[in-house]
Image: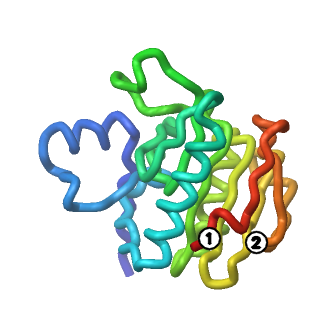
Amino acid sequence: MTFTKVRLWTVEEYHRMIEAGILTPSDRVELLQGQIVRMSPQLPPHASTTQRTARYLDRLLAEYAYVRMQLPVTLKPNSEPEPDIAIVRFDLKEYVDRHPAPDDISLIIEVADTSLQDDRTIKAPLYARAGIPEYWILDVNTRQVYVFRDPQEDGYTQEVVLTEENTLSPIAFPDISISFNQLFP
């Protein structure tokens, strides 16, 4: 039996493929741990929850941070996911010459309709290794929010599951209270 070695890609190589037209926006892919992975299609509950959450957070955090929806973040050396929502610090150039990096990111939110398992087992460790201080998963099927905090090299040490009746203040914005019932349509 012969084994084929998997070729892992760096963020720089991934960008060169995009610049060369090898990868295009219609490919709907992201770079995760060196692998180019096809993103899941969005069903209406996912799309609606993402849009509603982004609008709500944009109103709440307008004076404190940018709310980016389905845009890349760079987690060098070999990941560039496109989270559903990323709360990032203001940048005078509005990230025209780079994507936000871990030091720019205070909160990442993924919306899970069919992707809950991957969001928990692939993306949570990825975001923890990058040092993202807080990561939430909005489960549209159960209307629950998985909250991950205290990132370490091997994952987040704190994980709690809350319901839509709960409110929570993000670590980066302790004076802002987010009502989870406002996140779900």
Q: Is residue 138 above or below residue 56?
A: below
Horizontal side of 9 relative to 78 (left or right) equals left
Front residue (pair 148, 11): 148
Quadrant for residue 113, please give it: bottom right
Instruction: Please report the residue visible at 77 percent of the width from the left and 45 percent of the height from the top.
Output: 170
Image marks 1 and 2: residues in contact by CB distance under 8 Å: yes
The x and y percentages for residue 35 are 41, 57
Badge 1 or badge 2: first in the primary sequence: 2
Q: Secondary structure at mark 1?
A: loop
The x and y percentages for residue 163 are 80, 73
Quadrant for residue 117, please give it: bottom right
The x and y percentages for residue 172 are 76, 35
Label 1, on which residue?
A: 184
Is residue 155 at least partly visible in the picture? no
Instruction: Please report the residue visible at 13 percent of the width from the left and 40 percent of the height from the top.
Output: 20
Q: Secondary structure at mark 2?
A: loop
Q: Looking at numbered disc 2 in the image, what kind of residue is underneath it?
A: Glu
Count the marks: 2
